[in-house]
Image (cartoon, helix red, strand yellow):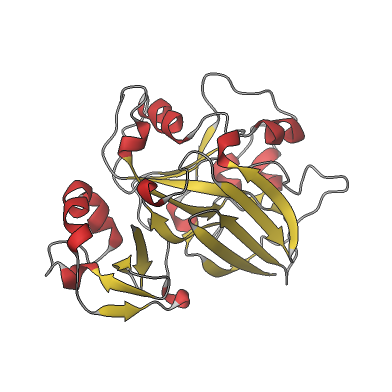
Amino acid sequence: MKLANHNSRAVILTSETEGIDVATASEGRFGPEIQDVYDQWDDFLTWAPNASGDTVAIDPAQLGAVSPRPLQSMGVGLNYAEHVTESGFDTPDKLPPVFPKFQSSLSGPYTTVTLVPGGDNDWEAELVIVIGRTAHNIAAGTGWDYVAGVTVGQDISERKIQLEGPAPQFGLGKSYPGYSPQGPWLVTPDELPNRDDLEITCTLDDEVVQSGRTSQMLFDVPSLVEKLSEILTLSPGDVIYSGTPSGVGFTREPPKLIQPGQVLVSTIEGIGTIRQEFVG
């Protein structure tokens, strides 16, 4: 199933251009907002396969963040070996670094982003996990059971505030308005060609800057959910940006950073594509 946040309403896609409004089809049982659906995820999964009714046309400009109001939104760092190497850090062994991506930075899939003036603005294409069931201290091997679905995300990063100073500010450097786009829709794991091995690519002005596979993660989707649940109580709708492959801009010689007027496109196999245009 593909579930969109369209015009602030939950919509089950019947194609990439049409879908069934959840609240209308369920006569108010679920929705209208997508967060309401996550809050009743198990009941929704039982109802959704038989959902029927008039379809609505999908306007890409009306697609919002797949989970716009998570109780918790976070990013995972250093989760691909080649990215660890290019960044000059040690490889995490027990737990990857985790930082907040504050809710005010979340946005939909097709956006115009205002760059931080004078900043070192960089890209990080990522698989985004959305939680569907409350998870705390869950058993090893069960992580996927707590995932509603996944989507495409960008962990756009302003490197100066992220890395400079007496202590890094990872959360703030990655939480400017519009710096956490996601979409175009949530895809449930059963829809994916191989939920543990998806191609992920990123282009800047049509130049391929990142190309990898989610199977290269040091901590895969289930282990991330399991390890985070050892400390946190994960709630329905919570968002986890799962880390980026190699190819980011600030580690290049010379550094390659996002400039006003450029276009960033991020794609994950079996899910879709998001697109950001940048202005100064």
Q: Is residue 260 left or right of residue 114?
A: right
Q: Position of residue 82 (x, y in %)?
A: 71, 34
Residue shown at the point (47%, 60%) measured from the top left: 183
Above or below, 227 against 1 in this view is above
Q: Answer yes or no: is residue 118 visible.
A: no
Residue 257 at least partly seen:
yes
Q: Position of residue 265 (x, y in %)?
A: 63, 62
Quadrant of the drawing holding the N terminus: bottom left
Q: Residue furthest right?
A: 254
* Residue at the limit of the structure toward the top, as seen here: 94
The mark tally for this picture is 0
Instruction: State left or right for residue 80 relative to residue 64.
Output: right
Residue at screen point 51% across, 60% down: 272
Q: Nearer the viewer, residue 127 or 240?
A: 127
Q: Residue 117 occupies which quadrant of the picture?
A: bottom right
Q: Quadrant of residue 29?
A: bottom left
Q: Determine the residue positioned at 50% across, 65% down.
A: 109
Residue 95 rendering spot, x and y as whole percentages: 51, 24
On the image, the x and y values in percent for residue 2 come to 36, 60
> Between 255 and 172, which is closer to the camera in this rendering?
255
Figure check: 79 above or below 137: below
Q: Residue furthest front?
A: 193
4 relative to 248 in the view: left or right: left
In the rendered view of the protein, which quadrant contains the C terminus?
bottom right
| Residue shown at the point (19%, 70%) measured from the top left | 52
Q: Give the quadrant of residue 47.
A: bottom left
